[in-house]
Image: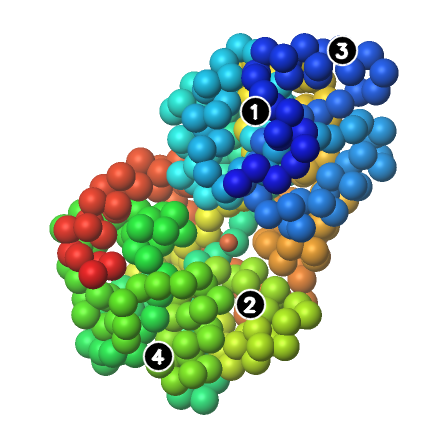
């Protein structure tokens, strides 16, 4: 769904909009961001960026088809920056040929190599871990491996959203990267056999189901726990309070993390402004907003983590590079279908 008047203007035609952006640029420096992210989550970042630089930001919010849209707009695309979550989407943007490589010292310094595209087409700005939500009342265990989620002792006790959701695809892809396809398939079958119900809902709904006694453990992202516990919704507060967070690890590895990341659009008309924005995202101010407003893990060393996220214990991120995990996403999606995970 397109949500801004700027976006509606764009729909009238890429060529017309290209002209509009170019003619407006002389008055004030502008930056055009295309994003899958929720408006509420990125607004604080954009506001702070404009405050610091005076650069006006136009944002196109899309819930699907962002890559196709930019590809269709072609060389006339007004897109400067692509902002999204998940390895898969960043990789897809690169595969679609709508990005260009970036080389900036600030990024190299702030963002560990594991979170970069090796060719510089995208990089992470923050991470989130895919963890276990465990019933405070019914689960005494405080540590766990991902492999253990397939242990029959959890039969009928596990909740999860669709196996085809990007977050789960990346987790399964990471399992393939660790164990190979055959073992990952066995694991996925075991996990499916443990499900309390057919996969449905989002990550927050799994916490809701734990509160309701439908399941004892669930798989979800870290930031939702903070958003539930610290948000305004009284129901969600109860869901968030019903669970403890366990940071699982792969056998012989760490905790699976995914990134929220950024890419420079191939035909970025405002490249200088785009580079300033990328530098801002990895600056102390940008990283602090990711950590403390969005409850994500900052990538830059020395930035304080949100207290709710810090309460989960020390995160030891898995050491397989994000770009390596991305290679197994297609295979992961095929496995989900093959084992009938969502059936
Ligand atoms: Fe999310």
Seen from the viewer's position, the closer of residues 85 and 201 is 201
Cβ atoms at labels 2 and 3 below 8 Å apart: no
In the image, what residue occupies the spot 56% across and 24% down? 11
Of pointers 2 and 4, the one earlier in the residue sequence: 4
Separation of disc 3 and disc 4 at Cα?
Answer: 57 Å
Judge whether residue 248 can be spotted in this image.
Answer: no
Seen from the viewer's position, the closer of residues 258 and 106 is 258
**Which of pointers 2 and 3 indicates the residue nearer the eye?**
3
**Which of pointers 1 and 2 indicates the residue nearer the eye?**
1
State whether residue 165 is above or below residue 8. Answer: below
Of pointers 3 and 4, the one earlier in the residue sequence: 3
**Which of pointers 1 and 3 indicates the residue nearer the eye?**
1
Cβ atoms at labels 3 and 4 below 8 Å apart: no
**Which of pointers 3 and 4 indicates the residue nearer the eye?**
3
Rendered location of residue 109, percent (x, y): 64, 34
Kindly identify which residue carries mark 3. Answer: 23
Kindly identify which residue carries mark 2. Answer: 225
Of pointers 2 and 3, the one earlier in the residue sequence: 3
Kindly identify which residue carries mark 1. Answer: 11
Check the image and tell me how it is coloured. rainbow
């Amino acid at each position: 769904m397109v949500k801004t008047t700027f976006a509606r203007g764009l729909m009238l035609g890429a060529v017309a909009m290209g002209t509009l952006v170019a003619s407006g640029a002389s008055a004030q420096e502008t930056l055009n961001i295309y994003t899958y992210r929720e408006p509420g989550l990125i607004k604080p970042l954009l506001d702070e960026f404009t405050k610091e630089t005076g650069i006006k930001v136009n944002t196109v919010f899309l819930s699907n088809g962002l890559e196709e849209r930019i590809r269709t707009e072609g060389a006339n695309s007004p897109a400067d920056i692509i902002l999204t979550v998940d390895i898969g989407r960043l990789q897809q943007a690169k595969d679609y040929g709508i990005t260009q490589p970036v080389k900036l010292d600030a990024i190299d310094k702030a963002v560990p190599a594991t979170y970069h595209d090796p060719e510089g087409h995208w990089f992470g700005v923050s991470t989130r871990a895919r963890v276990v939500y465990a019933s405070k009342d019914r689960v005494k265990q405080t540590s766990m491996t991902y492999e253990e989620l397939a242990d029959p002792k959890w039969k009928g006790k596990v909740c999860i959203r669709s196996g085809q959701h990007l977050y789960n695809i990346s987790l399964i892809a990471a399992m393939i990267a660790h164990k190979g396809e055959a073992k990952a398939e066995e694991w996925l079958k075991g996990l499916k056999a443990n499900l309390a119900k057919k996969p449905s809902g989002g990550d927050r709904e799994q916490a809701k189901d734990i509160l309701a006694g439908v399941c004892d453990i669930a798989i979800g992202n870290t930031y939702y726990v903070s958003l539930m516990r610290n948000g305004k919704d009284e129901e969600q507060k109860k869901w968030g309070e019903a669970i403890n967070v366990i940071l699982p690890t792969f056998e012989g590895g760490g905790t699976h993390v995914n990134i929220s990341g950024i890419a420079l659009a191939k035909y970025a008309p405002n490249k200088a402004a785009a580079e300033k924005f990328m530098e801002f995202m990895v600056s102390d101010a940008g990283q602090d907003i990711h950590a403390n407003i969005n409850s994500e893990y900052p990538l830059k060393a020395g930035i304080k983590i949100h207290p709710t996220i810090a309460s989960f214990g020390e995160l030891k991120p898995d050491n397989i590079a994000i770009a390596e995990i991305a290679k197994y996403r297609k295979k992961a999606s095929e496995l989900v279908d093959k084992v009938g995970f969502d059936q």
